[in-house]
Image (spheres, rainbow, N blue to C red):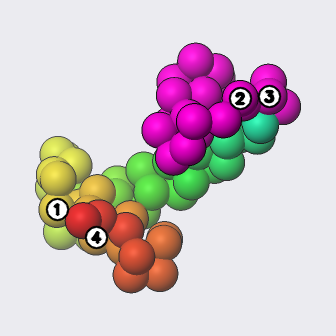
Amino acid sequence: MAEEFTLASMRRLLRRQGDLRISEGAAEELRRIAGEYGSMVAKAAVDYALGEGRKTVLDRDVRAAAESVWGGRGGD
C-alpha cells in the first residue's frame, strides 16, 4: 500500500514542516506509516458504508473512520 505514495510527496510533506534536508530513509518511513494509516482508515470507512447498507463510501465515512482510527484527532 505504501507504494501508492511517492517518495517526493513524502519529502514535500516533511519539508513543509521546516526547511530541513530530508533523508531517503525518513521519506520511506513516512511513506510506510502513511500507507498503514491510510489502509486502516480505508477499511474503517468501507465498514461504515456497509454498516449503513450503502455501496458508496462517502466523505463522512472517511472522516468518521479517520477520527476513530486517529483517536478523535483526525480531520480539521
Name the kind of residue labelled 4 in the image.
Ala
Q: Which residue is mark 3?
A: 23
- Which of these two is toward me, 56 or 40? 40
Does 6 appear in magenta? yes
Give the CA separation, mark 4 to mark 1.
6 Å
Question: Is residue 52 among what the camera can see?
Answer: yes
- Image position of 26 with respect to 50: above or below: above
- Image position of 46 with respect to 11: above or below: below
- Image position of 22 with respect to 30: above or below: above
Say left or right for 31 vs 18.
Answer: right
**Secondary structure of residue under mark 2:** loop
**Secondary structure of residue under mark 3:** loop
Q: Which residue is mark 1?
A: 60
Q: Which residues are magenta?
A: 1-25
Residue 7: where, in percent of width, then height?
64, 21
Quadrant in which the N terminus is drawn: top right
The image quarter containing residue 25 is top right
CB within 8 Å, label 2 to label 3: yes
At a point 79% along the width and 24% down the height, the residue shown is 24
Question: Is residue 31 among what the camera can see?
Answer: no
- Which of these two is toward me, 65 or 6? 6
